[in-house]
Amino acid sequence: MDTQSIKQYYRKHRKAIIVAVSGLLYAGGWSIGYFAGLNTLSAATLILAAIVGGYDIAKTAYHEIRSRTLGIKTLVTLAAIGAIAIGSYWEAAAVVFLFALGSYLEGRTMRKTRNALEELLEMTPDTATVRRDGEQKEVPAREVEEGEVVIVKPGEKIPVDGDVVEGESAVNQAPVTGESAPVHKADGDEVYAGTINQEGAIEIATTGSGTDTTLQRIIRRVEEAQEAQSPTESIIDRFATYYTPGVIALSIGAFAVTQNAILSLTLLVIGCPGALVIGPPVSIVSAIGNAARSGVLMKGGEHLEKAGKIDLVAFDKTGTLTKGETTVADVEGFGVTDDEALELAAIAEKKSEHHLADAIVAAAQDRSTTATDGGVAVSADQRESSVSAGSIPDPDDFEVVAGKGVVAHQDDREIVVGNRKLLDERGIDVPDEVAEYVREREERGETAVHVVRGGRVVGVIAMRDELREAAPGVIAQLQEAGIETVMLTGDNERVAAAVADEVGIDDYRAELLPEDKQTVIEEYREEGHVVAMVGDGINDAPSLATADVGIAMGAAGTDTAIETADMALMADDLERIPYAVTLSKATRWNIYENVGLAVLTVTVLLAGVLTSYVTLALGMLVHEASVLAVIGNGMRLLRH
Amino acid sequence: MSETTQLRVLDFDCPSCASTVERALSNEQGVEDVEVHYSTGRVEIEYDDSVADPATFEQTIENQGYTPQPA
């Protein structure tokens, strides 16, 4: 080994070497005194052990004093110097060695916690294959410019954020969304840097590269969240600023009264606020790191602590408990054919952007080309094409009645499409056979809209939004965890009751206008509940903000959702909700455990010192053990 | 011109150690703002590049007994 590499080795392992040398000197010094009785040599070796192990500690203590922050290292240094001054060399060496060993182990274990995100960072490849001047070229990934086309072969990691422009494939998005099932990607679909292209070759038009990618933004937010102080941390930090000077004062006071130097030095050592200040941040960093790896972005310790107290979870129905893909389940004409009723509704709804409108228009187009009795699903990406297609005549005018329906005119005839409220408001008579049909469909959890032409009901369209497969299981899991569940919906009472029954939810609130949802959450909070609201983060943004904890689903790629929510699920995956809630609860308990353990340790030690059972070295040993116990306990959350 | 650089210190062993490093860095010439986070080990330094030499930041952290590495 040449000098250069020895130096490097020393730099890298400096702390471990110092601890080892100090430990050996300490053991040697003690043996020389105990077995050989060479007291002077023993004392010299022990002092050397204290100096080797304590040099770094004393240096930091010097900086602490200079910057007027009295920290743990100041206390340890004072204790060691004091012990040497009164001739307790063995105690001095032991205190320094144990503290150095403890710090080394603490640093090492904390490194693991701090590294929890590293595997995410390593997901992004360093180079990308781009098409420049008609040629394929390999360039550093962060130098790919917006709009450039990147080629990704099967099995490769995607180096940039972008939209697929060529080819199709299954992409494993676990690094970003935490979902392990691959997602099908074709022309126009968004892909994220750091995700893995599994099957086919795809070409991607770059929308973001380098630090401007979804994954990088997520990691940055996770770190900010980990760094933000939780309420418990702030309280403890404030307490610690008075605590350390308090301990020094107590130690001086004890010496003044008892003249027992060892006693007052021991007080210095056991009074260090180690486990108390370290506990809460370790719990929070571990929990947020764990959540991030599962595709759940927690905004910070404050939100996490609050989420730990959740006792009621409110779900938005559409798109959260259900798939959000409304289909026309059935059409019934009254005095006209089913198809005529559907077409009339489609004319009125053609220019509307409501999700029910999209389903009606799509179904009408589908029927006009191929007659079918099955439903037509409408998803977000199909919307544009369905609305712009032209086989359905335009209405002359149309007006949306929020939460109720639309009123339109075509060829001087009025067409009204809407719920019972809208019909009652306009004085339109609903025949019994229509009401009977509507009731029957609603009892199946379907939303029924009336089609009215020239003041007479000519049809009813029944629409269905399937439950997510996971929904009943998720509700059951939350109930098992002792959490009340509530569904909020704009649907009427009967539909809501049917869906609530199907999903097994505790309670529901029906016929809510968007702003009513906020009011309902406010009411639950006033009743003393700690309320979480689950929604899509865009339409539900106000109610997410009103709830104690707003949880947005499917947030990858939508910054608004991440912005408003306290917790964001990157994937559109309901099953993460029980995980996020139980993790928060576990974190809250973990923090309590850590604070409790720390306070208990100090109390027991204090009693031990005052009754002379605890010596300087033993005090230090127990203190360091308590710090390591607290870190170990916090790190359990990494494996929740 | 004001510049920002990031370093990472993975071996902080207590929260007050992080504050001590923060103070030491902010006492350096040309350093405008420093944030040192115990929980993530992230060190963020904003400095005036006509006065401060970013190479000295690592030395300062090492002098405090910690190992800086690129973020």
Image: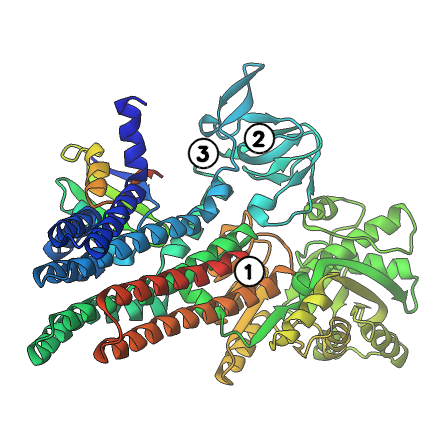
Q: Amino acid at mark 3?
A: Gly
* Residue identified by numbered label 3: A210
Element class at badge 2:
strand
Q: Specify whether disc 3 shares its chain with disc 1.
A: yes
* Residue identified by numbered label 1: A640
Q: Amino acid at mark 2?
A: Ala
Residue in the image at 17% along x and 42% along y: B31
Residue in the image at 36% along x and 39% along y: B71
Q: Is residue A141 left or right of residue A131?
A: left
Q: Tell me if I can see residue A273 in this picture.
A: no
Q: CA distance from mark 1 to mark 2?
A: 38 Å
Quadrant where the image shows the N terminus of chain A: top left
Name above or below for residue A265 compared with residue A635. below
Image location (x, y in percent) of residue A169: 70, 34
Tell me the chain of label 1: A
Image location (x, y in percent) of residue A477: 66, 70
Q: Specify whether disc 1 shares its chain with disc 2.
A: yes
Quadrant where the image shows the C terminus of chain A: bottom right
